[in-house]
Image (spheres, coloured by chain):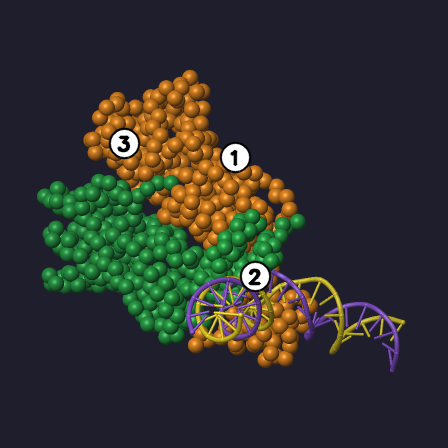
Chain colours: A green, B orange, C purple, D yellow
DNA sequence: AAATAAAATGCAAACGTTTGCATTTATTTT
DNA sequence: AAAATAAATGCAAACGTTTGCATTTTATTT
């Protein structure tokens, strides 16, 4: 039977007025009499009327929908960003279509096409690791759809961007390691072709250069960023190489993989080898020893990204003015990098003992 | 300038045919000549045409969009479900609008209204903890929109459902504890008003009843399911009560909170007190000792949910036939519940040493 | 070559809003 | 009380597709 949904026409008919008036009444247009509005609202409720935003979008040429593309939703970093984005976008009357590129350039392209077809009012994207060509994003701009990139960005595009100051986050962390007395270090991270790892390495190198140490002269491992791969690499590495004093891991997951390999060999952290991570994943405060890392304020990043997009949308400029928001991450010192003598100096007592994180 | 987007009309005009033909050609309609199709496709590319799915949806009365409401996206359980859902829905030509209820009944109601207004082809929902009235879901059915509930479900509604067999998951875990020789137990979990905790307790009670133990006669803590709250509760509890042999926590996060309180007191797990969790959160395999828990196959749950919805949509029946998919969870035994004597009997070597989980 | 069947295309309405402009109705001013 | 102004409503087109039915074109049969 596909029960017919009530439309503004139905409301209009049963009140002996026109659809225009109903439309305006429902949108609380100032030119409509108060009493008329009330009649309309009452009748709408009575008929169980639900607005059809598709029709509205068609007429207006724009949907009240924002598209968002992330590599994966089941990464805390990204799902927190999503939460931040929604906290800004929903109150503004937009809702989110979330797409996952799964680190595939082709899927990213498909996602873009879907979002354009949906006539979204704007697009937020953190590009996949695989993406090297940006024509699909240029197409978005060609369709006059505002675009904001976050976290994984590219210099090739002149659009609004939100990024973490990976250089300084990494620099601060390296400074901490230096202050603890570590000199003999090892770097592990994802490929430096990606801006995040590139920048994190830059901060690491910079801090070391300041004390006359060449980061490139010490071990550097660039590889797959998964826990498992890093675990395997590290198992093998430990067999054939001397231990550094500290491992600077540009990712918590990689750090975790290394930790498992290290502990499996019976080595003590931080006594035999110290280690730090990056991102402050929920588990970082839960493992033993608690992991020194860098908090990225992902929810804030989401908010900043959404705000930038909203401004872009509301401005309705023909020429977009590319702006950049740079978020400053925060060093979180925990046990995994503390020298025995300074074990009690944990600068971050709170997050050391009672980490954030709620459960389902 | 708001550069005008090309429409099928534009294509039609420049090829001296009608929009109908163009529309059919683009949709690969069998009645259109191959050569015509090729002309159209070529011209579409040339004009940089992007279909307007809003217009299509309006005409067809249905969007190619599915709405999904979860309490939060930044919970591994839910974000994995999302991944599962997308893996089924995207290939079928649908995309997801994701909404978060944030455990608020009012937000859930708002989400539903938005989704109805968007004329989504179907809705997937895991209800918020706060939700006690289901009129908003009845409204969905009233609009003939297929609805599938997952994980957090209710008996009050006669719709398709996907749930975990919490009773048996919990039963299996309790059996394991009994086999390890534990008798003196303590339960901690969320309120038993919620089906998940209700059922998990039922499995726990059942297994205990079989050996003549009354679960209710032993300590039972029902509370807020956050790590922090549980940590505080447990700190206090340890001051005033004797230790049980084992703590059955119906949530990994609650278990983690308890573990922190226990370890802070200098007590050893599992030697002084054993503990188990539920859900197999990523950190469960990373902490020390590794946590015995129950894997819920969340991605599978997402797939099952999406499949049920797709069937519902494609069937286009007037009367929906409510079906239920029940997923069997799997016990994962790790160190936190193993008796000293049987430390080597870890039945799940793989997940014990090399847990799943990739990093950003 | 005409008649018939099959294939391809065209016509026009419809989907449910929104909105600029025109018109009507109510209110104020002279 | 008429004129001028303000407030409220109506008219009709438009947004870009899809689709049942009618029509034209092409292929097949006699």
Residue at the spot of label 2: A19
Q: Position of residue B235 (x, y in %)?
A: 24, 31
Residue closest to the far top: B212
Please state which of residues A204 and B135 is positioned toward the viewer in this rendering. Answer: B135
Do the residues marked 1 and 3 share a common chain?
yes
Q: Secondary structure at mark 2?
A: helix
The chain that hosts pointer 3 is B
Viewport quadrant of the C terminus of chain A: top left
Q: Position of residue A310 (x, y in %)?
A: 36, 63
Do the residues marked 3 and 2 share a common chain?
no
Task: Indicate which disc, 1 or 3, sits on the residue closer to the N terminus.
Answer: 1
Tell me the distance, in whole angstroms, between the alpha carbons under discs 1 and 3.
32 Å
Which label number is shown at residue B155? Answer: 1
Left or right of B228, for residue B305: right
Which label number is shown at residue B233? Answer: 3
Query: Residue B291 falls in which quadrant of the image?
Result: top left
Is residue A231 among the parts visible in the rendering? Answer: yes
Q: Secondary structure at mark 1?
A: loop
Tell me the distance, in whole angstroms, between the alpha carbons under discs 2 and 1.
41 Å
Whether tag 3 and tag 2 are in contact, CB under 8 A, the answer is no
The chain that hosts pointer 2 is A
Q: Secondary structure at mark 3?
A: helix
Whether tag 2 and tag 1 are in contact, CB under 8 A, the answer is no
Is residue B300 among the parts visible in the rendering? Answer: no
Q: Residue at x 69, y 68 (%)?
A: B31
């Amino acid at each position: 039977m596909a029960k017919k949904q009530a439309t503004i026409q139905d409301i209009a008919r049963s009140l002996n007025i026109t659809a225009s008036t109903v439309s305006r009444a429902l949108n609380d247009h100032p030119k409509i009499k108060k009493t008329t509005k009330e009649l309309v609202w009452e009748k709408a409720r009575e008929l169980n009327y639900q607005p059809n935003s598709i029709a509205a979008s068609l007429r207006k040429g724009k949907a009240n929908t924002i598209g968002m593309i992330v590599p994966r939703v089941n990464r805390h970093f990204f799902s927190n960003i999503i939460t931040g984005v929604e906290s800004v976008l929903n109150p503004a009357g937009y809702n989110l279509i979330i797409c996952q590129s799964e680190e595939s350039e082709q899927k990213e392209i498909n996602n873009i096409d879907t979002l354009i077809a949906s006539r979204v009012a704007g697009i937020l994207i953190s590009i996949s690791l695989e993406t090297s060509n940006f024509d699909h994003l240029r197409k978005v701009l060609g369709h006059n759809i505002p675009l904001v990139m976050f976290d994984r960005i590219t210099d090739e595009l002149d659009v609004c961007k939100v990024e973490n100051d990976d250089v300084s986050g990494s620099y601060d962390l390296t400074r901490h390691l230096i202050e603890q007395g570590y000199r003999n270090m090892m770097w592990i991270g994802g490929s430096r072709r990606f801006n995040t790892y590139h920048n994190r390495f830059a901060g690491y190198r910079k801090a070391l250069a300041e004390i006359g140490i060449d980061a490139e002269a010490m071990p550097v491992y660039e590889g797959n960023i998964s826990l498992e791969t890093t675990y395997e690499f590290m198992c093998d590495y430990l067999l054939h190489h001397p231990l550094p004093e500290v491992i600077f891991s540009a990712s918590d997951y990689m750090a975790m993989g290394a930790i498992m390999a290290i502990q499996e060999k019976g080595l003590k952290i931080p006594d035999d080898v110290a280690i730090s991570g990056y991102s402050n994943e929920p588990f970082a405060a839960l493992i033993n020893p608690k992991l020194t890392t860098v908090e990225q304020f992902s929810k804030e990043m989401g908010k900043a990204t959404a705000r930038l997009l909203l401004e872009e949308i509301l401005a309705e400029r023909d020429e977009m003015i590319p702006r950049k928001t740079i978020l400053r991450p925060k060093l979180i010192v925990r046990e995994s990098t503390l020298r025995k003598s300074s074990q009690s100096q944990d600068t971050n007592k709170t997050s050391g003992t009672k980490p954030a994180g709620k459960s389902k």
